[in-house]
Image (cartoon, rainbow, N blue to C red):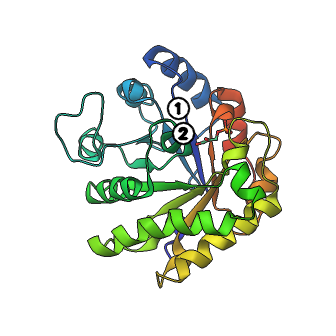
Amino acid sequence: MNEAVRQPVLAANWKMFKGPETTRTFLDRFMELYPAHSDRSVVFFPAAISISAFLAARSGRDDLEVGIQDVHTEVEGAHTGAVSAAMAAEAKLGWGLAGHSERRQEFGDEDAGVGAKLGRLLEAGLRPILCVGETLEERRAGLLEEVLSRQVESVLDGLAASGSGPWSDKVLAYEPVWAIGTGETATPRDAAEAHGLIREILSRRAADEQAATILYGGSVKPDNIEALLAAEGVNGVLVGGASLDPDSFAQICLARSDR
Ligand code: 13P
């Protein structure tokens, strides 16, 4: 397993917040509070329109990595409003999200399309984060494992077909839909259970599944970050609301992690 890859990943998903100016203001303050650390990766997913402002404003701080929130399933074409993984690579981004629950719910992204997006990210040389997670109804109906299996396995089919590289390159994010933006956080025990299930699902298909990095997302805050990072199998976090404020995201990024 590649240790550099398995160090904790602290990722900020800014969703549809922050234009170029507010991105610069955020970074001015964040860079004062958070000096570069070699034992963790900090990654931002700004809105596409603010990415060049981010890259310019982080000057000299290449430790603050940048990714794209979503890509199209095609490399290029007549798809108004969309961005491709190849374009993100050309903009020198290192990461890309695929399958965020808001994309699944609001934009109709389905498992097969999510798999295609993940394939495009890998082809373009970006490090993908595959987002999976169950709704409250699915959890209450006892469908956690079934939902995670469906979401992960449909992507594995596509990856097997494209002969994609080792799992040490890949990241999944377990984001229970009921914990996103609700203030309701999965307990460290819930997170550990789901992360264990995801690794088990991967192990049915991939020999090196233990190398995958699995993040937790859903109402992560400065006051629950250390407990979540200490949970079994949790290799980092994907943060929405609490990443919009430089002080609270800096606290999250500075959290102690023994893993
Ligand atoms: P919140 O941290 O706002 O719950 O959002 C989580 C999320 O969706 C990150 O991708």
- The location of residue 104, given as percent across then percent down, is 50, 45
Amino acid type, label 2: Glu
Determine whether the residue tagged by mark 1 lies in a helix, strand or loop: loop
| Residue ID at (47%, 81%) | 205
Residue found farthest to the top? 21
Nearer to me, 251 or 206: 206
Q: Is residue 80 above or below residue 235?
A: above
Is the CB atom of the residue marked by disc 2 within 8 angstroms of ligand 1's nearest atom?
Answer: yes
Q: Is residue 237 left or right of residue 136?
A: left
Residue tagged 2: 102
Q: Of discs 1 and 2, which sits in the foreground?
A: 2
| Residue ID at (29%, 74%) | 161
Q: Is residue 105 above or below residue 170?
A: above
Q: Is residue 117 left or right of residue 154?
A: left
Note whether residue 253 is visible.
yes
Q: Earlier in the sequence, mark 1 or mark 2?
A: 1
CB atoms of marks 1 and 2 within 8 Å: yes
Nearer to me, 19 or 253: 19
Nearer to me, 52 or 129: 129
- The location of residue 129, given as percent across then percent down, is 48, 54
**Quadrant location, the C terminus:** bottom right
Q: Residues within 10 Å of mark 1 (few under 14, many from 20)?
A: some
Is the CB atom of the residue marked by disc 1 within 8 angstroms of ligand 1's nearest atom?
Answer: yes
Number of marks in the image?
A: 2
- The location of residue 168, given as percent across then percent down, is 46, 70
Note whether residue 254 is visible.
no
Amino acid type, label 1: Lys
| Residue ID at (68%, 41%) | 180
Where residue 227 sits, quadrant-wise, is bottom right
Determine whether the residue tagged by mark 2 lies in a helix, strand or loop: helix
Residue tagged 1: 15
